[in-house]
Image: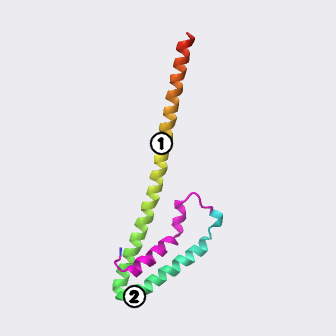
Amino acid sequence: MDPDIVVMKMALLLFVFSKNLCLFSSQLSKENINTNAIFLIQNKYAEIIWRYLIYRYGYYDAVIRFMNLIQCLLAVIQTMYHLQTVQSHVEDVILLAENTELKLILDDIDQINQTYMN
């Protein structure tokens, strides 16, 4: 990530207005999301960052810094996506363990009932 605090703050705003961010919350209603507005805001922040980088570092360094910034943001989005799928996998494993425990308890109860009935 770029050590320039202004770039970091704008990068966070760019990330917040990323269309992909809505993938990470199952509680959001997709009807309430105006993807065109998000896209326009994201583009505006990207343009502001780009212009700032050119002003501050010149064209050549701006290209390198902007490319690094985008790679960093894509890595964060990809990591968050994988974390979300890992979390759902963890929840599935917990549910499987709970169901297995319940099945074993019910089997024990059946064995106890059969023992007392015979």
Name the quadrant of the N terminus. Answer: bottom left
Q: Which element is circle 2 on?
A: helix
The residue that appears at 63% across and 61% down in the rendered structure is 29
Q: CA distance from mark 2 to mark 1?
A: 51 Å
Nearer the camera: disc 2 or disc 1? 1
In the picture shown, does residue 37 fall above or below 25?
below
Instruction: Give the magenta part as a residue range.
Output: 2-29
User: In front here: 28 or 57?
Assistant: 28
Q: Residue at x 39, y 70 (%)?
A: 72
**Residue at (52, 81) in percent of width and height:** 44
Task: Please report the residue visible at 55 percent of the width from the left and 21 percent of the height from the top.
Answer: 110
Determine whether, in the image, residue 34 is placed left or right of residue 44: right
Residue denoted by label 2:
54
- Which image quadrant for residue 28? bottom right
- In the depicted structure, whether residue 3 falls above or below residue 87: below
Q: Which residue is mark 1?
A: 94
Residue 12 screen position, x and y as percent: 45, 73
Looking at the picture, which amino acid does disc 1 mark? Ile
The C terminus, quarter of image: top right
Q: Position of residue 23 (x, y in %)?
A: 53, 61
Residue, far front: 116
Vertical side of 31 occupied by 93: above or below: above
Tell me the amino acid under the disc marked 2. Ile
Residue 83 sits in which quadrant? Answer: bottom left
How crowded is the residue under tag 1: few (<14 C-alpha within 10 Å), some, or many (20+)? Answer: few
For the residue pair 109 and 34, the one nearer the viewer reads as: 109
